[in-house]
Image: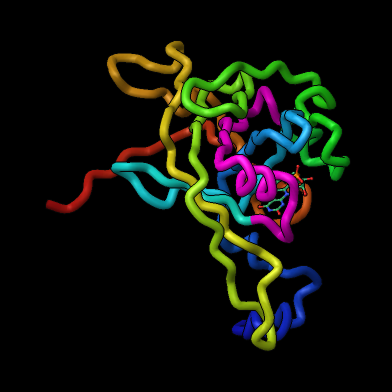
Amino acid sequence: MHYDPRVGNGGLAHDPLTALVVPRPIGWISTIGESGIVNLAPYSFFNAVAANPPFVMFASAGVKHSQHNAERTGEFVHSLATWDLREQMNITSAAVAAEVSEPVLAGLEMAPSVAVKPPRVKRSPVAFECRYVKTVDLPGRDGGRHPFAIVIGEVVSIYIDDALIHNGIVDTIAARPIARLGYLDDYAVVESLFKMKRPV
Ligand SMILES: Cc1cc2nc3c(=O)[nH]c(=O)nc-3n(C[C@H](O)[C@H](O)[C@H](O)COP(=O)(O)O)c2cc1C
């Protein structure tokens, strides 16, 4: 089949877009809210978009707390979502009021960051401390504004659990990161890797 995504789903029961870009890493974004409360939520429109120096982005469908807080305070932190933390990650996606702290809701202990105020998820083996750079709006249908906006941050400090580091190499597989697949409840877990040499 072939279809124009600006018009519809090509007759499919559900929009297949997210099933076609897989797996999508999960940005588990912590920020500080108006009242100083710690906000935490998963974003699978998330990725690293540049290295040396590194930048990451997450995209928010409407101005949710994470975007609002990142823009207001100029800071956010991404913690790696792993198989062991999958239930807690899911709980933190609940649409709760700004006064509700999702780490408390999910029974998650947070640990202080080094360079920014939002803390990281203590049990997560990797965290990126980010300084908010800019929000990029996208054109929507009929010349309007797209519901999604891209929030970009520069990674200014990186935490890695020493237990993951062997001979100077980070054992990503040992962390068992989880990622989003296409439809509502579908996830992947990264459990294997293969190597392939680039052509010279
Ligand atoms: C795995 C997962 C990935 C998600 N990815 C996104 C996303 O990329 N963009 C988005 O706007 N919402 C996403 N959501 C929904 C948000 O996590 C949810 O709306 C949350 O309540 C937002 O919290 P906040 O208002 O505290 O930022 C995702 C939910 C889950 C479970």
The answer to whether any part of residue 154 appears in the image is: yes
Residue depicted at 42% across the width and 52% down the height: 49
Within the magenta stretch, is there residue 68?
A: yes
Q: Against 163, is 156 above or below?
A: below
Position of the N terminus, as image quadrant, is: bottom right
Front-most of 43 and 2? 43
Front-most of 20 and 133? 133
Residue 57: give x, y in percent of width and height: 52, 50
Front-most of 72 and 136? 72
| Left or right placement of residue 154 versus residue 187 in this view | left
The answer to whether any part of residue 23 appears in the image is: no
Residue 186: give x, y in percent of width and height: 72, 47
Residue depicted at 33% across the width and 45% down the height: 51
Q: Quadrant of residue 86?
A: top right
Magenta extent: 60-86
Q: In which quarter of the image is residue 164?
A: top left
Q: Against 145, is 20 above or below?
A: above
Residue 189: give x, y in percent of width and height: 60, 36
- Seen as rendered, the residue at the extreme top is 163
Q: Against 90, is 200 above or below?
A: below
Residue depicted at 68% across the width and 81% down the height: 144
Q: Against 77, is 161 above or below?
A: above
Label tally: 0
Its colouring scheme is: rainbow
Residue 199: give x, y in percent of width and height: 17, 53
| Left or right placement of residue 123 versus residue 99 in this view | left
Within the magenta stretch, is there residue 63?
A: yes
